[in-house]
Amino acid sequence: MTRPLFLDHHSTTPLDPRAFEAMRPFFEAAFGNPHSADHAYGWEAEAAVEAARRDVAALIGARPGEIVFTSGATESNNLAIRGAAARLPEGRRHLVASAIEHPCVAAVMDLLEGRGFPVTRVMPDRDGIVSAEAVAAAIRPETGLVSVMAANHEIGTLQPIGDIGAVTRPRGIVFHSDAAQAAGKVPLAVEPAGVDLLSLSAHKMYGPKGIGALYVRRGVGLEPLFAGGGQERGLRSGTVPAPLAVGFGAAARIARAEMAEEADRLRGLRDRLLDRLSAAIPGVAVNGSLTARLPHNLDLRLPGVVAVDLIHALKDRVAISAGSACASASLEPSPVLRAIGLSDEEALASIRIGLGRWTSAEDVDRAAAAIAEAWAALTGQACRVEFEA
Ligand SMILES: Cc1ncc(COP(=O)(O)O)c(C=O)c1O
């Protein structure tokens, strides 16, 4: 099978071969349970898990003891929000979240609302930014927790986490941020940002699927989701999957070393793609701020098409999506795009493109030509694509 060019790096990323190599021994001879305290198999796996914990912590400026391994960002978000909400005292049970959160935060807010926690959802501006002022305006004396993502999963907009932390910290409000899309792509430093809880996912940053982490600032109390053996400081019972933790640690180390250079390269390619598509498709528009944005993200609305038709027409050549992986199969307009003020028609005409570590300039040119051709075929326009190499 020849696969189409993969430009959907927000849904997931390929495993970096260096992370794969680091994991390999822990699937083979070094198969011990990291919680076995009685023999060398356990000690070896434990040492590897702890090294990985240090690497993940270093990526976000945390202490290793503040990292709790989970199965991914969905679990981290559930543990953070449900776990913190369960500890909020009577009279501090009001929750604030942005209106553009991933479904695994939005649905937790809905669930808690149904259980008697009042929730205020803060709208972004037209650029897709949730300002600290808007968050401050939503805060009440009863507010116990604020959740605002670090980077949006559709339009890639970067939220002013540090400014929001400056609002929540002096008020003693727990501040959670979902950094599944931001981690490894843009610098994150939990302490100066005033973040108390931060969710991470390895498979969004060239690590393996099935592992993530929650940063839990020292002193922040959480109710665990499961009862069990009390691993991960009692916050996440269950055997830590050592091979996955090692792969996550390697991915974090690689990201820390290469992030700045990779971001510059991908920003250049992203701009090249936008230039080519703008030249070929009259009226193409970018959803969300182009400056406060993940360097590898482009979310575009194309006039005169329904995105799912375009994506279908491209399916043998380029893999892109109409939104987040969980929502892209539905024909409902994206809540994120609606929240930034797009009409249903504009939202349904929007595509999400995510460039990645192995995307080349040739790939970008090929993708631009394919998208422009598909758009022209669907809209009955003459194809205006003439790209120089
Ligand atoms: C912002 C955001 N949060 C959470 C998740 C869920 O991550 P995971 O697949 O690790 O559960 C995703 C995945 O799309 C995401 O983009």
Image (spheres, rainbow, N blue to C red):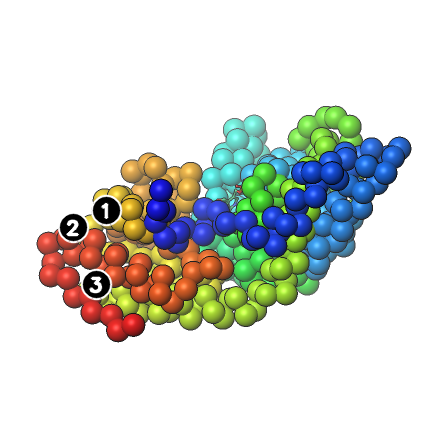
Q: Can residue 329 be seen by looking at this rendering?
A: yes
Q: Position of residue 151 (x, y in %)?
A: 51, 55
Q: Position of residue 311 (x, y in %)?
A: 28, 47
Of mark 2 and mark 3, the one earlier in the sequence is 3
376 vs 258, left or right, is left
Q: Name the amino acid, label 3.
A: Ile
**Measuring 52% from the left and 66% from the top, which residue is drawn there?**
262
Q: Position of residue 349 (x, y in %)?
A: 26, 50
Cβ–Cβ under 8 Å for marks 1 and 2: yes
Judging by the rendered image, the residue that carries numbered circle 3 is 281
**Measuring 52% from the left and 52% from the top, which residue is drawn there?**
181
Judging by the rendered image, the residue that carries numbered circle 2 is 378
Q: Residues within 10 Å of mark 2 (few under 14, many from 20)?
A: some
Judging by the rendered image, the residue that carries numbered circle 1 is 313
348 vs 100, left or right, is left
Q: Name the amino acid, label 2.
A: Leu
Q: Identify whether 127 is placed above or below 106.
A: below
Q: Identify whether 33 is placed above or below 345.
A: above
**Measuring 66% from the left and 53% from the top, which residue is drawn there?**
250
Q: Position of residue 364 (x, y in %)?
A: 35, 63
Cβ–Cβ under 8 Å for marks 1 and 3: no
Q: Name the amino acid, label 1.
A: Ala
197 vs 321, left or right, is right
**Measuring 26% from the left and 56% from the top, which residue is drawn there?**
371
> Which of the two marks, 1 or 2, is nearer to us in this view?
1
Identify the image quadrant of the N terminus. Answer: top left
